Image (cartoon, rainbow, N blue to C red):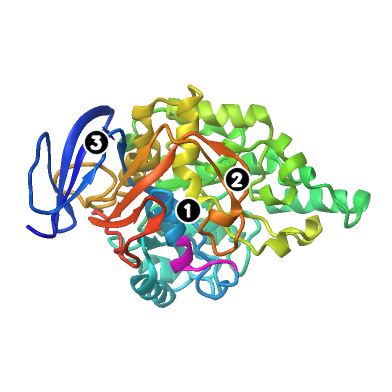
Amino acid sequence: MRNDIIIKNCQIVNEGNIQESDVLIREGRIEKIASNITSEGKVIDASGLHLFPGVIDDQVHFREPGLTDRGNIKSESLAAIAGGTTSFMDMPNVLPPTLTNDLWRQKIDIASKNASANYSFYMGSSNENIEEIRSINALDVCGVKVFMGASTGNLLVDNEESLNLIFRDSPVPIATHCEDTPMIKEAEEKYIAEFGQEIPMEAHAEIRSREACLKSSQKAVDLANKHNQNLHILHISTEDELALFSTKPIEEKLITAEVCIPHLYFNSDDYQSKGSLIKCNPSIKSPSDQLALKQALKSGLIDFVATDHAPHVLAGKSNPYMDCPSGMPSIEQTLLVVLEMVNKGELSLVDVPNVTSHNIAKRFKIKDRGFIREGYWADIVLVNLDSPQVIDDKNTNYACGWSPFNGDHFSSKITDTLVSGEHVFSRGKFLKTQQGKQLEFLRS
């Protein structure tokens, strides 16, 4: 068939194994995995390359609608596929905030016309929108986002009865941002009294403290246990919080956690050189926290990685501490950062798909994605593990035009990305765009 694609001679890294094989893709799906496949279709010679399932990122901020001076679904999904991320789940803190099913459907419509990676969107939560949450279609919506710490817009849920109702009645997994707002406000006032507008950027780790994270995460876990609710805690940043989780297989967990790329790659020592570029919420904390997070990812206490990709205009990141927005772009470097952990002996190569694809697909019950399996959609990425590169702001695909990884060295390079069986990126060039499909979920 003329629309077939055959990937020849690749080393497939998938489901705990590495095997040399060919992959036949037909009508967007993986038709066959075997040696010496022949077909009249397009051939991709992958000799010397490793084939991974495409990264699934369950936490991004692509800024559309309403904040498109920083990025949009088109620009940031292109950056995603250039870095090997083939599916994303976007957060509700846009303008207007995604607090109704109608607004959620509007975002789906935007993505259907502009997304180059597969997509889903969280429903936002507030103190007043429980009826919208109750009416969610669980086969379409990836989850409900609950800000249990200070946030933008009308998205902070600080009413105890509202929290109880959300945890009791949500028909989809609840994903929480856990920081205690009163503790943060108290710390801010202390530093303002001491420094005025000249608060040093490294104070961010103390203002957005470990105690604020732990208190809020513990509260979320208590609510999930009370209501027997599926809870996923986003961007764990401290060693202290790890005691809340278990190493059971992810299929047996009601409560799961992730670590974000900034917290894996940076630590508080990096504020000296990176400054406001690595200001994010929750804050990047100590080297010992960073080490504990890496070990927890390896042991299964933390289930997978995400980015919390959150671009900002560079001029805004130059403002004094209190006026400097939190967040950074990172989705183009996700797989590179995880592979650097492999190079340093912090993770095994066969575990990479678990933390970038398999476990996310299992946790959210994504239909026919996240694995290299016959019958599944061909969301896959080819990587040269021995192709060193230096990240340069000028060569990144972020609409904001900068990266916190500027000048950093990586040992690997993404060579090709396929989304839903379409060859969309190859050797630094986009071959096709706007090929993403809406994610589907298998839930009872």
How many numbered badges does the structure rendering display? 3
In depth, the one of 13 and 430 nearer the eye is 430
- Disc 2 to disc 3, how far (Cα)? 29 Å
Classify residue 289 as left or right of residue 332.
right
Residue located at (91% from left, 55% from top):
196
Range of the magenta residues? 70-76
Residue type for callout 3: Cys
Which residue position holds label 2? 405
Q: Are marks 2 and 3 in contact (CB under 8 Å)?
A: no
Q: Mark 3 — residue?
A: 10
Query: Does any portion of residue 305 appear in the rendered image?
Result: no
Residue 21 visible here: yes
Q: Amino acid at mark 2?
A: Phe
Does residue 26 appear left or right of residue 128 in this picture? Answer: left
Question: As shown in the figure, which amino acid type bears the numbered disc 1?
Answer: Gln
Give coordinates of residue 345: x percent, y percent.
48, 22
Write down the residue under mark 1: 59
| Above or below for 352 versus 233 | above
Q: Earlier in the sequence, mark 2 or mark 1?
A: 1
Count residues near mark 3 (Cα–Cα under 10 Å), then give few for <14, some for 14-19, many for 20+.
many
Query: Mark 2 or mark 1, which is nearer to you?
Result: 2
